[in-house]
Amino acid sequence: MTNRFSRSSHADRVVLASVIVATAVSALVAAVLLVVTDGPGDRVSAVGRGESTGAAKEKPLRLTPWSLPYAGGHWTIASDSLRGTLFTGTTVVRALADELVAMDVATGRRLWESRLPATLCQASTIADGGVGVIAYGSEEDCGTVAGVDLRTGRLMWTRPLTIDESAINGAEPQLARSGDTVVAAMKHHPTTAFRVSDGAQLWTEKAALYGGGACYTDSYTGGLRLVRLASCVANGFHGHVVEQVDPGTGRAQWTFRLRRPGLLKGVLSTDPIMVDDEDRSDKAHLVVLSDQGTVRSTLADGLEHSGHQRADGNPSGNVLISGDTVAVALEPKDAATTEQNTIVAWSITSGKRLWGIRGSTDTMRLHPVPSTGGGLLAYAVGRVNERPQLVRIDPASGQQSVVRQYDPADAWAGAEPVPALYRGALFLTCGILGAGGPTPTDHALVALPGL
């Protein structure tokens, strides 16, 4: 690879690193949705796509509402909310601050518990072959990566990360998994890739990955592809590039240079590859890239913005796709005066804007529910005493139809819940918690009838 960029100054790197850390700290980190499979080839991705093909063909669960409370009010070191809901067969596994808990999906009956060696701080959303990847440590140092047998909770391998205070990684731990590779990017540690099946170290990020150029990685995003968002300096100016990465070597398969100024960039999806090239005006500017790193389409701009995108290594849960329609949950231009958000849809082929919708009341927000079999779905929730709804959205018109309404006492999972559809049932991991931690009305996991 040729040297594409000139060297940056130490001051440039410090300034840009400070912005990245500040952005990561301010990000809303909602519950981590890990994905579990019954065996090789049976992928379930509750964040990226919803259910696996196999899960979609199974009969819907006959489920009565149940919930899992927080054990002793414990939560996580990394944020006020951590994703961690894992599905396999008739079992759902919830990752808590210091343990994994397995339950029967239909009844919530406790099946097993597995204590972790230290506090959980991150988890991948993909677990092909029944193997999950987690990271744990202390509040000061999230420094150990582990592979977990998600059928038993047994740690299959553990790998401590090398200390490197000069490593430029954001404050939020990242685990980006694609196939049998997971990339761990933790503060004070060099970015390192491991083979998921046995924990073997594959590569560590070095300047050689950029051809010796003045670049460093903002984030990796896993899923169908491994995609890297990097910051580079050329001729004294900061720029950003998106690269599809060979999971086995860390080397770029192609590079796409983003054109707009500003630092609030993000990779929303890797199937297809969708990038938010948000500029200094804070307006979302979404670009869909091809498998070859060329522009497939530029989605027509509006006045909405993305808010703060999480950079935890997992694809965004705010993206829904049905055929040629892609819909993204965004914050409206009048976000300062309303509690509502907006789901906006475009044609992937033409980039034409199709519609934009909001919740049915002034306080209701729409949370996308990724699903391969249910079309475009959203979980609509307002304040704690309002009746939440599961709604279906028509891809052509954006018209909403109510699938189910729920009793607020059964369905409350915080102000920003992250929903997943599994075998037709709706599972909610908790949203934002108050500064004092979980209250009696907050739950680590809520299971509800769905489709």
Image (spheres, rainbow, N blue to C red):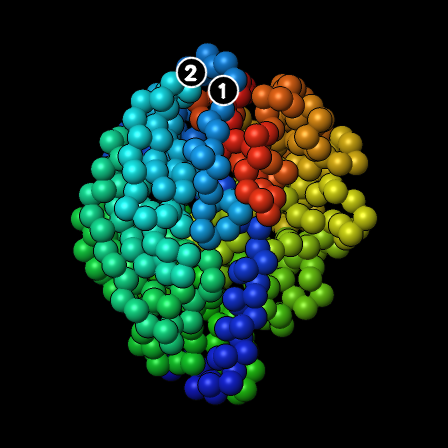
Numbered circle sitting on residue 164: none
Q: Is residue 140 visible?
A: yes
- Amino acid type of the residue that numbered disc 2 sits on in the rendered structure: Thr
Identify the residue at horizontal 37%, vertical 61% (top origin): 141
Categorize mark 2 by other alpha carbons within 10 Å: few (<14), some (14-19), many (20+).
some
Real-space Cα separation, disc 2 to disc 1, in angstroms: 7 Å
Categorize mark 1 by other alpha carbons within 10 Å: few (<14), some (14-19), many (20+).
some
Residue 429 in the figure: left or right of residue 189: right
Identify the residue at horizontal 30%, vertical 26% (top origin): 112
Image coordinates of residue 43 in percent, x first then y, are 35, 35
Quarter holding the N terminus?
A: bottom left
Image coordinates of residue 238 in percent, x first then y, are 55, 78
Kindly state the secondary structure of the residue where label 2 is placed: loop
Q: Quadrant of residue 338?
A: top right
Identify the residue at horizontal 53%, vertical 47% (top origin): 80
Residue tagged 2 = 107
Identify the residue at horizontal 49%, vertical 41% (top origin): 31
Q: Are marks 2 and 1 in contact (CB under 8 Å)?
A: yes
Residue 27 in the figure: left or right of residue 382: left
Image coordinates of residue 36 in percent, x first then y, are 34, 34
Kindly state the secondary structure of the residue where label 1 is placed: strand
Q: Is residue 69 above or below residue 236?
A: above
Q: How many marks?
A: 2
- Amino acid type of the residue that numbered disc 1 sits on in the rendered structure: Trp
Numbered circle sitting on residue 66: 1
Image coordinates of residue 187 in percent, x first then y, are 40, 65
Q: Nearer the viewer, residue 335 or 172?
A: 172
Q: Is residue 308 above or below residue 179?
A: below
Q: Quadrant of residue 35?
A: top left
Quarter holding the C terminus?
A: top right
Counting residues from the N terminus, which is met first, the one under dot 2 or under dot 1? Answer: 1
Q: Is residue 420 visible?
A: no
